Amino acid sequence: MSQRPYIVGNWKMNGSRVMLAEARAIDRAAQRHPHAEVALAPPFPLLGALREAVSAIGVGGQDCHTAAKGAHTGDVSAAMLADIGADFVILGHSERRRDHGETDALVRAKAEAALAAGLGVIICVGETLEERDAGQAEAVVARQVEGSVPAGEAVAVAASRLALAYEPVWAIGTGRVAAVEDVVAMHAAVRARLTAIFGEEAAKVRILYGGSVNGENAAALLGAEGVGGALVGGASLTADAFLPIIAAAAAPED
Ligand code: PEP
């Protein structure tokens, strides 16, 4: 199944209203590159304003709670994200797994809540350097995929609204990019796990690479077998840095 490459910027805990100008510039560029599906995930306080500032790109949150509402101070529900116009949510980012002790089971529960609220979901998985050096990278990532993707009733709707992001922890924000052959091997392993879970529907799930993607390495990564897009942190904060990545996702017909 041929799908548009999915290029998602994760602003993490960065940004202010001044940066809406960057989002507008990214939105204009996305209109010139319809071969790619482009999205931004700003911090919660910017979500509504960014939604109103753009028209061609998707807008998403960086986390959500498992419950729809209630006594959970500081949290945001998937229904609230949908209500403010978000299209998707990033879940299980390694920074949340590290900073907030998020487990695969919690990520799965959040993903199921997000799907129930009508959102798309990007689930992040990836091994640490110690795990890679110990030869455990594929086993770790397989376990994360199996434990984090929706189960039960959610499976029926999950595949069409789900993306996986393979993000080796040691490549995030470090300037150190995974070797293309290692990315290809890991994406094939993730695809195999997804096929075991979703059957033929797994073909709908895009698998993104994340970890120090920039304008210089994007073409090689995005052109690699099995890579359906990129989850981009630092290089998504300015239009100047993000646009070459969008352009690198150019389809052959463009
Ligand atoms: C990320 O935030 O998911 C990420 C991959 O960050 P960076 O591109 O900065 O490595």
Image (cartoon, rainbow, N blue to C red):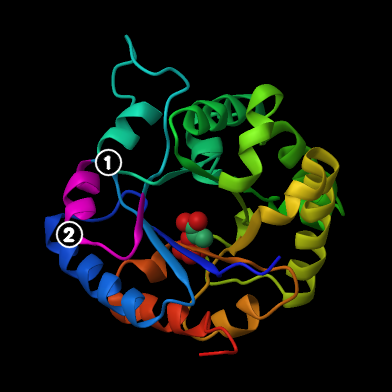
What is the x, y in percent for residue 216?
51, 86
Q: Which residue is depicted at the point 52% across and 33% down?
A: 115
Q: Which residue is mark 1?
A: 44
Image height of 170 relative to 72, above or below = below
Q: Which residue is depicted at the point 81% across and 57% down?
A: 133
Give the residues drawn in magenta, as a range.
45-59
Secondary structure beneath dot 2 equals helix
Image height of 125 relative to 220, above or below = above
Q: Which residue is mark 2?
A: 53
Q: Which residue is depicted at the point 17% across and 62% down?
A: 20
The image quadrant that residue 210 belongs to is bottom right
| Residue 112 seen in the figure | yes
| Residue 173 seen in the figure | no
Secondary structure beneath dot 1 equals helix
Q: Which residue is depicted at the point 50% across and 90% down?
A: 254
Crowding around mark 2 (Cα neighbors within 10 Å: few <14, some 14 to 19, many 20+) is: some
What is the x, y in percent for residue 62?
41, 43
The quadrant in which the N terminus is found is bottom right
Find out if the beta carbon at label 2 lies less than 8 Å from the nearest ligand 1 atom. no
Q: Amino acid under label 1? A: Phe
